[in-house]
Image: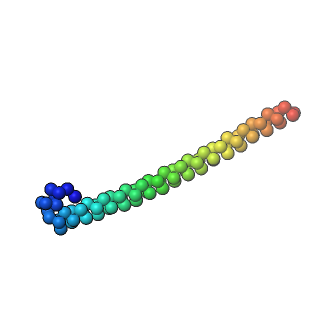
Amino acid sequence: MPFVVRDKFGPEGSEGLEMMFADAYTLANESFEKRLEIETAKFRLAVAELRFEMVKWMFLFWAAELAAIAGIVFAIAR
């Protein structure tokens, strides 16, 4: 705490002010961490949903490709 503040508020006032700032910092830090955890969870959920969609479409394209190849083989074999 700067000397000017200690001189103006006294030892008890400057300690109270210092404790108030420390509590405000702790509260802001906890709030930020909670928001960060929530946003991280939302991001992970979005990634999981996109991953599922990608696997689903990959399977559909694979099935269509297999059907096309089977049709070509069947047409050649006849």
Q: Height in image: 37 above or below 73?
A: below
Total number of numbered discs in the rendering: 0
Q: Tell me if residue 15 comes above or below residue 35 in the rendering.
A: below
Q: Is residue 48 shown left or right of residue 15?
A: right
Instruction: Write the residue at 21% across / 66% down.
Output: 16
Pick the residue in front: 68 or 12.
Answer: 12
Front one among 15 and 35: 15
In the image as oriented, which residue stretches furthest toward the bottom?
12
x 12%, y 60%: residue:
8
Q: How is the image coloured?
A: rainbow
Percent across and percent down for residue 35 are 40, 56
Task: Using the image as rendered, state which of residue 61 and residue 42 is in the foreground.
Answer: 42
Compared to residue 21, the image places residue 78 above or below, namely above
Tell whether 25 sits left or right of 43: left
Q: Is residue 42 left or right of residue 54?
A: left
Q: Residue furthest left?
A: 8
Q: Position of residue 72 (x, y in %)?
A: 79, 33
> Residue reaching furthest front?
3
* In the image, farthest residue toward the top: 76
Quarter of the N terminus within the rendering: bottom left
For image coordinates 32% across by 61% down, the residue present is 27
- Residue 78 falls in image quadrant: top right
Q: Position of residue 69 (x, y in %)?
A: 77, 36
Percent across and percent down for residue 41 are 48, 56
Q: Which residue is at 67% across, 45% downward?
A: 59
Q: Quadrant of residue 24?
A: bottom left
